[in-house]
């Protein structure tokens, strides 16, 4: 191995470092030569799962590397970021840096009201505000070189800092809280003004069941593929049809000039017993209208069936347990698959395309069984 060119080994290691950081860490322990060659890939792919200590240690290591090496420090190219339902309060310490509860003596900051700077610098957040600041700081630190991002914040997490620009980001998956524009402080500003947040973004996957077309068209003008998952009975149809230029939606021009493919995945239908069947009829109308709207689409449109093994409750409340394990696992595996050159969440079958059916045919049974006779 020591006889292989440095550039060749770097290329080989880059292809191997697609699992969120485990391979890069393992390579650094092989031998001195492999450690030196793989060093630039130390943060090539990173997976963070919301634990305060894990997030803080990662940020401290990243800052230390940059302070020591400057522009030659390893860059984060691919990030999977899931935040948790943290047990923190804005006023008191519920769980301290070292497992202390309510300021017990296990936490050095509880013993010392003015801890050493290094202890404070490496200590995990103690309040929800500190946690939100840590999340924003990590995103801003990695944004300049980031190429793929999966960001899945906990539903009740505080909004992240507004105005972060991702100049190199090519693929993005966002969950609902990250694109909730009501707070005015998130990954996407509500106003379509200022610097575009994602100038070269080509693939966007939203898990919220809808999207603000005007805002995304401004901040991500180079989009070629859009996927919206979680389409359900409360989804506004114009939030979807305006993506591909349905004239009835009021969009006379194409919102996304380079768009090639739009993919939508519906949720399982609600129970016909719920609310006297009203929500089920809403679901029927949304699915049927979405299916029919594809006729006037100027791009390829696919409507995927509900995900297997999940109920509507699992999709609307992601923290309910189900057989597939943690709700974010499928997104993690799709992200890894894309890094390895796979299709990830962008797999499509012609049977899910409107073009595969006659113009007078109703929506197929895989969308909702009762729609066969719609």
Image: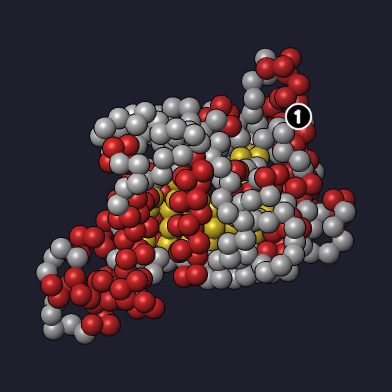
Q: Quadrant of residue 371?
A: top right
Q: Is residue 171 above or below residue 101?
A: below
Residue 234 image point, x, y percent: 72, 34
Residue 308 image point, x, y percent: 49, 35
Q: Is residue 373 above or below residue 337?
A: above
Q: Is residue 36 visible?
A: yes
- Depth order, front residue of 135/152: 135
Q: Is residue 298 visible?
A: no
Residue at 37%, 50% in the rendered image: 55
Residue at 42%, 66% in the rendered image: 77
In the image, is 60 to the left or to the right of 359? left
Element under label 1?
helix
In the image, is 55 to the left or to the right of 357? left
Q: Is residue 212 above or below residue 284?
A: below
Residue annotated with mark 1: 282
Residue at 42%, 62% in the rendered image: 78
Residue 4 image point, x, y percent: 18, 82
In the image, is 264 to the left or to the right of 49? right
- Depth order, front residue of 305/337: 337
In the image, is 20 to the left or to the right of 80? left
Which quadrant: the N terminus? bottom left
Circle 1 packing at 10 Å, graded few (<14), some (14-19), many (20+), is some
Which quadrant: the C terminus? top right
Q: How is the image coloured?
A: secondary structure
In this rendering, the count of numbered labels is 1
Residue 11 image point, x, y percent: 30, 76
Residue at 36%, 77% in the rendered image: 70
């Amino acid at each position: 191995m020591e006889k292989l060119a440095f550039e060749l080994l770097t290329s080989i290691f880059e292809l191997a470092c697609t699992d969120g950081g485990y391979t890069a860490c393992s390579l650094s322990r092989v031998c001195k030569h492999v450690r030196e060659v793989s060093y630039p890939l130390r943060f090539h792919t990173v997976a963070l799962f919301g634990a305060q200590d894990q997030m803080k240690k990662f940020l401290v290591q990243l800052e230390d590397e940059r302070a020591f090496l400057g522009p030659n420090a390893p860059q984060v190219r691919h990030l999977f970021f899931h935040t948790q339902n943290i047990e923190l309060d804005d006023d008191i310490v519920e769980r301290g840096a070292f497992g202390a509860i309510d300021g017990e003596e296990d936490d050095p900051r509880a013993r010392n009201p003015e801890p050493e700077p290094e202890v404070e610098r490496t200590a995990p957040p103690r309040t929800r505000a500190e946690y939100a600041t840590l999340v924003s700081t990590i995103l801003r630190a990695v944004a300049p070189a980031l190429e793929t991002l999966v960001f899945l914040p906990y539903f009740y997490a505080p909004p992240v800092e507004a105005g972060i620009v991702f100049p190199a980001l090519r693929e993005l998956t966002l969950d609902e809280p990250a694109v909730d524009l009501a707070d005015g402080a998130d990954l996407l500003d509500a106003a379509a003004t200022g610097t575009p947040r994602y100038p070269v973004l080509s693939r966007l996957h939203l898990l919220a069941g809808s999207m603000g077309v005007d805002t995304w068209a401004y901040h991500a003008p180079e989009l070629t593929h859009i996927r919206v998952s979680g389409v359900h009975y409360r989804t506004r149809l114009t939030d979807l049809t305006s993506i591909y230029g349905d004239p009835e939606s009021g969009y006379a021009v194409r919102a996304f000039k380079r768009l090639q493919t739009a993919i939508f995945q519906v949720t399982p239908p609600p129970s016909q017993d719920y609310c006297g069947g009203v929500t089920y009829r809403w679901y029927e109308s949304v699915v049927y209208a979405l299916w029919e709207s594809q006729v006037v689409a100027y791009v390829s449109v696919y409507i995927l069936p509900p995900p297997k093994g999940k109920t509507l409750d699992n999709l609307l409340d992601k923290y309910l347990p189900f057989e597939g394990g943690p709700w974010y696992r499928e997104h993690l595996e799709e992200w890894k698959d894309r890094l390895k050159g796979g299709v990830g969440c962008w797999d499509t079958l012609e049977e899910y395309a409107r073009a595969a059916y006659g113009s007078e045919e109703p929506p197929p049974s895989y969308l909702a069984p009762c729609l066969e006779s719609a």
